[in-house]
Image (cartoon, rainbow, N blue to C red):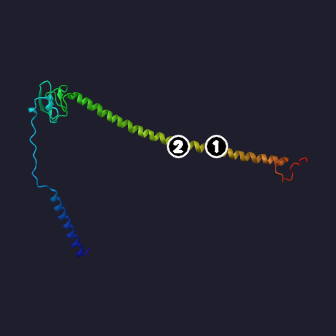
Amino acid sequence: MSPFKKERLRTLTTSVFLGAVVLCVSFVSQGECQTTPPPTPCAAHKSCDKCAPNAKCLWCITTNNCTEYPVSWLLPPPSVCQLSQARWGVCWLNFEGLIIAMAVLGGTILISITVCCCCCCCCKKRRSRPDRDEERFVRKREEIKQRADERNVERKARHDQIRKKYGLMSDSDHPYSKFENE
């Protein structure tokens, strides 16, 4: 590359970079940052309706208190609250029922997807098989018809030879044809 082209490429790259920086700075607003108030601790909630919708909290009916959901465990241990008495997300459904409902829903979805995939694969096989069977059937029928035509031609040739031999040809120009009474 010539020195002139290198210099031109360098200035073009620098210009594009500076343009990108100016564009980014122009999109950033100079407004004040909004801060959210710190979340209320779970222990401050005194009813299930206030505690359960908060994803970090778990309401226990037996103790009537709101506790932090133990995120280190997938399911809360019995020392925190029994599954049948725990409420998380909604108050009308206990944690045990929620787990069962989610498992049934997930299993139903997985089974539905599996059945749909299997049906699609089977339907493709079913659609392709009749085509092959039909092609084979048509090919056999064509072979049978061809053999029958060949036999008919051979039979006609033999019959014509016999007719010639005995003078029964329907040709009027045949020298040994029958004379008809006039």
Q: Is residue 151 left or right of residue 181?
A: left
Residue 132, image x, y percentages = 52, 43
Q: Position of residue 5 (x, y in %)?
A: 24, 73
Is residue 69 visible in the rendered structure shown here?
Answer: no
Label 1 residue SS: helix
- Element under disc 2: helix
The reply to whether residue 106 is visible in this rendering is yes
Residue holding disc 1: 144
- Comes first in the chain, label 2 or label 1: 2
Please, is residue 57 above or below residue 9 in the view? above
Determine which residue is flagged by label 2: 132
Q: Residue at x 48, y 41 (%)?
A: 127
The amino acid on which the numbered mark 2 sits, given as a three-letter code, is Arg
Q: Position of residue 143 (x, y in %)?
A: 63, 45
Which quadrant holds the N terminus?
bottom left
- Depth check, front residue: 58 or 155: 58
